[in-house]
Image (tube, rainbow, N blue to C red):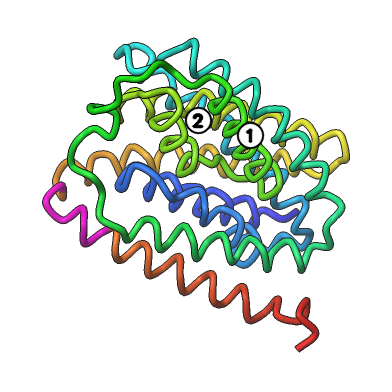
Amino acid sequence: MTTIQVLLSIVSGTIVGFVLGLLGGGGSILAVPLLLYVVGMNDPHVVIGTTASAVAINAYANLIPHARAGHVQWKEAIVFAVSGALGAYAGSTIGKLIPGKQLLFLFAILMIVMAVKMAMPKKTRSQADDLKNQVKMPQLIIMAILVGLLSGFFGIGGGFLIVPGLIFAAKMPMISAIGSSLVSVGTFGLTTAVSYSLSGLVNWWIMFAFVGGGVGGGLVGAWLAARLSKQQRILNYVFSGVVMLVAIYMLIINAEVLDL
């Protein structure tokens, strides 16, 4: 690891933090390609382990203001996090067994799904307003395990899946689902990070540099978001396009897994 790589890690973390602060989500999906193609890390498994560690720290840090504001429904959040941690551990164990090129090819497909989802119009009202049933605990647990499995496999936070899962199974209003999801994002990331670190697949110097950059980028992104609130839809479209292009690039350079 060189000084240049550490500096590039700070820059990459700043980009991810900026996107998260500006758009409120989605930035973490760029962490893997940034560490691979900008920082120059060679082992996809080390990249995923390092990304998971950074995701965990950022999620727990962002949880604090949400908790202080009363946006976390702790019972459901903890059940989802603990159940999903089992899936995250299983997913990370499976992920370490998959050859790097194949893992990156699958990750690129996930990026395309994420890009399409971000480009879709958001619902303007709370998705839980009309739901009067009790919390469906079995569904909550099953959904948590499945989301955790995906999170652990790819080393991502999984917030874009956790939020709708909490709305559907726990009947949470959107703001509570966002705050509560951070408990799971942090826990899934921590579980994955522990699994990868036990196998020596986390670069701690790059991870801390990445997180440090993310803090500064997040502050700038949040500041700019307040001034560009009317352009949020356009910003989402632009970001979705960027993610789509990066995903297509990753598919092309890893296409050998299809024996093309």
Task: Identify the residue shown where x is 56% and y is 53%.
Answer: 31
How crowded pointer 1 is (Cα within 10 Å; few <14, some 14-19, many 20+) is rated as many
Residue 19 in the image: above or below residue 42: above
- The residue that mark 1 highlights is 189
What residue type is disc 1 on? Gly
Residue 164 in the image: above or below residue 230: above
Residue 123 in the image: above or below residue 258: above
201 and 140: which one is in front? 140
The stretch of residues the image draws in magenta is: 229-235
Task: Identify the residue shown where x is 68% and y is 40%.
Answer: 149
Q: Is residue 62 magenta?
A: no
Mark identifier at residue 47: none
Give the spatial CA distance, label 1 vs label 2.
Answer: 9 Å
Q: Which circle's residue, 1 or 2, is located before the other in the chain? A: 2
Instruction: Indicate the position of residue 260 as horizontal and vertical percent values.
Output: 75, 89
Instruction: Indicate the position of residue 213 as horizontal and vertical percent values.
Output: 49, 43
Spot the residue most to the left.
Answer: 230
What residue type is disc 2 on? Ala
Specify whether 53 is left or right of 28. right
Task: Identify the residue shown where x is 49% and y is 10%.
Answer: 75
Q: Of helix, strand and loop, which one carries label 1? A: helix
